[in-house]
Amino acid sequence: MVRLCLFDLDQTLVDSHDIEQLRLAGVHRADPAYVGEVQAAFRVRDRRIVDEAFLLDLRQRFPDMKLGIFTRSPRRYVQAVLQAAYPNIQWNAVVAYEDVRNHKPHGEGIHIAMKSVGMTRASDLPDVLTVGDGDVDIRAAYHAGCPTVLFKQGWPDHYERTHWRAMDLLPDAIATTPAELLSAITDPIPKLPDLECLLADSQRTPARPRFDGIAKFFPNDRTRHVIHAAGRSFAGYESLNYRRAWHGLSQSIQDNKEAMVFPVQWVDTIKRFIAYHYRMIAAIPFGEGPELVVTAIPARPERVHRLGRLIEQLAASYGDTPRMNRMRLTFDPGVLAYRPGVRSQSREHLSPDERFANVRDHLYVVNPAAARGRKFLVIDDVATTGATLLYAQQYLTNAGATSVDCFSIAQNVSDPLR
């Protein structure tokens, strides 16, 4: 249950992109005329992205939930805007530029807001929800340790870097309209990435699963490649300690680092991805459907092929004649392999460039002739730079595969303060 809902202000609640200089001036101006200037500029047009009626409805639906503001804007500006836009809303917490030592993406302001409404324990963090429009809002929530909604209603037609970065961070929920935002506040679990939703409550999974498409790039190449992920794995940085401590998929990844039998939810989320992603192919009205070869990123030569075991477990779940409607499924853990000398990406703490070079020089397609004319789905457990999946896609395509899709159990979330 959400007990404190914290909104970003600019471009989340109100559209202020054209008065940015006036907003920033509030840090240094204390004269009475400043408030009048802000309110006059604000009233030139209706700048509310979220109507006051929506916030009043939240108050009525959830009388025990506190409402707050967490923004990088100066306090005098914030007070003037809130008075003009939401005169009938009593905010339980307002944290502005002057109230924190460390600004977003630092999560200090979220902890200050929590303390102001009597939420002082780490166990309170899952009951706090932030709503923001950009990557700094998502990163601040991750650093503070609470869930977050990416609210897109105020986005421009042409996305800026902050928007692409925000989506690649896989926020807990994504809302484009106030109705979707209300749904995320009312019942956050079905809005989670698919595997996180399954781990939280497999009985409440939505019919349309959420698999985020994350942009990945080869070094010095701006061509966008998409990897689909079923959730997040919060990395072992101190800045993520609060969030990682209560995050189910991060714990599941850690618990299964050496596993040979995997949680049923891992298998189920792969099956849900296949059913959803290939639904048009699987529903062809006549004839025999195409074949999809499901494989995995290989283990290093001296290691047991753990993900191969996952592929075997997945195959067994489909029974003796694996298919998805008319689409035939083939499971082959041995499509890809590493040459001797490949380094451990994580244990040796390779840099992004080293990761790409390591995979580039050692990954290969075992039988290139067998890849020609076939469709592939390549599965990894945790994607960081995406190097392994990107080279798997490239090398299979070079071998003549007709299509290669990439799927990761989780996307690694790195230090939000970097």
Image (tube, rainbow, N blue to C red):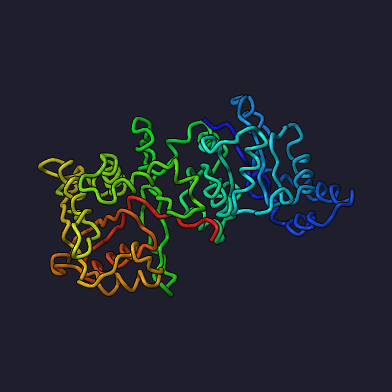
Find residue 276 and report its image quarter: top left
Depth check, front residue: 375 or 90: 90
x, y percentage for residue 25? Answer: 79, 57
Residue 401 image position (x, y, % from top left) = 22, 65
Q: Is residue 27 visible?
A: yes
Residue sitting farthest toward the right: 32
Q: Which residue shows up at 65% across the image and 40% down it?
A: 113
Left or right: 299, with 238 as reference point: left
Q: Nearer the viewer, residue 391 or 262?
A: 262
Counting from the top left corner in percent of width and height, residue 95 is at 69, 44
Can the viewer see residue 159 in this picture? no
Image quarter of residue 371: bottom left
Q: Residue at x 54, y 32 (%)?
A: 2
**Can you say whether 81 is above or below 57 in the image?**
below
Using the image, determine if residue 191 lies above or below residue 23.
above
Asked if residue 345 is positioned above or below residue 119 in the image, the reply reads: below
Query: Residue 415 versus residue 406: which sits nearer the camera?
Result: 415
Left/right placement of residue 120 relative to residue 23 reads left
